[in-house]
Amino acid sequence: MEGAGCRGATRAGETVSTLATRRNLLIVLIDAGVWASWSAVCGYVAHRIPPSRLSRDRGLLRIRGFEAGGRCYERWLRIKRWKDRLPEAGAMFRGGFSKRRVRVGDRAYLERFAVETRRAELTHWLILAASPWFFLWNPWWLGLAMVGYGIIANVPCLAIQRYNRARLLRMIPRPFATRTA
């Protein structure tokens, strides 16, 4: 009786001790340092991009029709419930822009806010793009774990930036086009 119930627990303990070797723990520490360093580099590089280069939605940063002005994030992800719980690092570098609060009614401010959501989204895409590199020095299973970490750490931030920008673009008053007959 005793052996039958403990056999599974023993195997699990053996698996954990096999995975938690000194070498693997050292690799995980290196991975954490790489993620932190790469994130800081990407944030700094994106911070240095002139606002004029981020003044319009282009390519990967373009808001798609299925996003329905941000409403898809509200329906599918219930983003309003959790988006304010994530950290906001827009003002991390000198001259940065905090995206914690929105001032409604000021067109120039709203346009700058939209630029900063593009900057933040680009930063998270760049960070996420590093995921495959972890397979170079990690065992395959730890490489998969690093890809998983990259997704878990960045996709919610990407969703928040896209959601906020879709909503901002609806708030920015557009000049009336003059009609000719």
Image: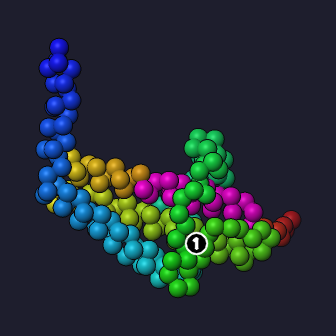
Instruction: Where is residue 35? Give x, y as percent.
Output: 33, 65
From the viewer's perspective, is 137 left or right of 173? left
Disc 1 crowd rating (10 Å Cα; few below 14, some 14-19, many 20+) is: many
Name the residue carrying label 1: 116
From the viewer's perspective, is 146 left or right of 81? left
Residue 179 quadrant: bottom right
Q: Which residues are magenta?
A: 153-172
Residue in the image at 42% along x and 56% along y: 153
Instruction: Where is residue 122? Give x, y as percent.
Output: 47, 67
Between 97 and 106, the one nearer to me in the picture: 97
Residue in the image at 38% along x and 65% along y: 127
Is residue 79 inside the magenta stretch? Answer: no
In the orientation shown, which residue stands out farthest toward the front? 2
**Quadrant housing the N terminus:** top left
Residue 4 quadrant: top left
Instruction: Where is residue 156? Give x, y as percent.
Output: 50, 53
Image: 9 above or below 50: above
